Image: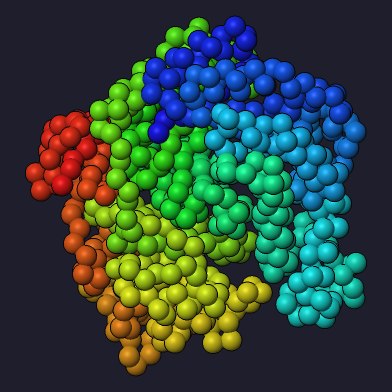
Amino acid sequence: MLGVCYYPEHWSESWWEEDAARMRSLGITHVRIGEFAWSRIEPEPGRFEWGWLDRAMDVLAGAGLKIVLGTPTATPPKWLIDRHPDILPVDEKDQVRGFGSRRHYSFSAPAWIQESRRIVEAVARRYGEHPGLAGWQTDNEYGCHDTILSWGQHDLAAFKQWLRRRYQTPQALNEAWGNVFWSMELRSFDEAFLPNLSVTETNPAARLDFWRFSSEQVAAYNRMQVEILRAHSPGRFITHNFMGLFHDFDHWDVGDDLDFATWDSYPIGFTERFPFSEEEKIRYARTAHPDMAAFHHDLYRGVGRGRWWVMEQQPGPVNWAPWNPIPRKGQIRLFTWEALAHGAEVVSYFRWRQAPFAQEQNHAGLNLPDRTLSPGGEEAAQVGRELKALGSLPDGGQAPVALVFDYEASWITRIQPQGQDFDYAEMTYRWYEAVRRLGLDVDIVRPGASLKGYRLVLAPTLPYVSDAAHAAFRDAEGFILFGPRTGSRTRTFAIPDNLAPGPLADLIPIKVIQVSSLRPGLQEPLTGTVQGTATRWREDVEAGARVQVHARFEDGCPALMSADSKAYLAGWLEGQGLRDLMAWCLDRSGLEGMQLPEDIRLRRRGALTFAFNYGNSTWDVAASLGKVVIGSRELKPGDVTILAT
């Protein structure tokens, strides 16, 4: 249940056996290799050097480690770029992004697709049935360094073909995009353009379609690799390592072709990059925000259809955030147990040994460059001992709360934010945080997935409501809360004929007349059953006859309203007001929560309850949560307590 990322090509071959034996002694069972090794596998076009990788695979397998082999497509070698410079991506300002780091390719370049097929097939044929091979990782971190949207000639050519398939005629395209506006009408698909480099704002419908196209290119590229691997490596799993705080392609679609999802967990770095207040960033600088890792655990459990790993777990300070503090003592152990509590099958640390060279030399590993255990390595070893003592973990079940998460909603609200600080990532995170502070577990689900069995469903914002999503909301058995902007756009980025919430008006008969984005300092107080202050966004809503209004803005407009088991919030609520709203939702859904201290979180996995302390004060764990099996009822800062009921 523990793993590590290892780069045998970085180290003397004389170290490999000792490294593998030490991994096993720490309780590590899985090792990921190979995802950046193309130049060592194929140092010249068509000349493969397999010997070193053969020996590395045999050494690791001989120590009893299960190997995850990465396809090496995240780092095209220099000779390939020299042969095919047109595979390089192009940024939005029409500048080629060159060789010298990684992920330097466009998903639409024909030569790149051909070369990717060739190297993936070569590696799959060589190692597909190796006895030590447990499974595959495709590529590495699709989209890292803003590499989903590329704006080159290959991207334009592929986009034109995508538009032809989607719209069939230029007239249909013109109508869908509203091209009569500003005389943007096209006579043929040959006249289609990329939505960049214009004088002012480009057509939002065109931008949304370009994002959809780009996302589908990623899914098709991943599917190509998956099909090759399945053909040559039967019986082995295939996964991909997704990232945190990254919405530039639809992970649900890519996940459909995988056996399970994995993600790369760097909670402290993500906390530094997230739009938290300065007070929060300082408070959680060495621990990460209490919901940062958990949110992504629940997201990728959903993407993996119940199965997921952490492929890269932060083992100490990282090198890529604006500031990179040392994690608080005990935090690596806490991160590991938290992932396991949320259902991770394996938690794999990045990396075995800190590299003393190149771009990541300030990124910690389980070992220091001198081959001794790092502080994070000591904590990983402690988890290994604890896992051995605890034995197998029970399966988890469905959570009582579902949060609907939509990548397209992120694109829509970035394309046309209307308010500079309307941030989809922040809104969804804050709703998740508010319900977790009430002690409840959350499943994160895709739009259109079945919502049956959930007592409470949260849709922070869902601008486009598909037929499948509408049907799932209609058939849901629990209480649903929709947030602002839900149902405010059609599939073609237009305002619905019946105004927002569009197709959901048959479930909650309201009409959004106009919207207001609120600059910092402007606030809209709410009074009623739920009180608080709307910031960033509010809407003027007309409520139908069967709608019950629970809170109003100062001008009398409805702020929170419901019809039967569906409710709508017409503003951006945060802080205590948002927490009170979630408590109101629990009451309406028949759920019981508990008011946790600000820095304490709980997670259940079967008969086990896990308690985590991100704060600086000891918390006394209630006897009602179960019998302590690991830890203490005095949950100290940075510590974990595991209880059994």
* Number of dots carrying numbers: 0
Residue visible at 54% across and 23% down in the picture: 61
Closest to the observer, 261 or 284: 261
Residue visible at 31% across and 79% down in the picture: 565
From the viewer's perspective, tell me whether residue 261 is left or right of residue 562: right
Q: Position of residue 457 (x, y in %)?
A: 36, 67
Taking 307 as reference, is 9 above or below it? above
Q: Position of residue 189 (x, y in %)?
A: 87, 70
Taking 208 as reference, is 640 above or below it? above
Closest to the observer, 493 or 340: 340
Q: Where is residue 541 in the image (x, y as percent from the top left)?
A: 42, 81
From the viewer's perspective, tell me whether residue 383 is left or right of residue 584: right
Q: Position of residue 566 (x, y in %)?
A: 35, 78
The quadrant where residue 156 appears: bottom right
Residue 522 visible to the viewer? no
Taking 502 as reference, is 480 above or below it? above
The quadrant where residue 170 appears: bottom right
Colour option used: rainbow
Closest to the observer, 74 or 528: 74
Residue visible at 40% across and 42% down in the picture: 344
Quadrant of the snapshot with the N terminus: top left
Residue visible at 79% across and 28% down in the picture: 77
From the viewer's perspective, tell me whether residue 442 is left or right of residue 104: left
Closest to the observer, 275 or 379: 379
Residue 237 visible to the viewer? yes
From the viewer's perspective, tell me whether residue 64 is left or right of residue 531: right
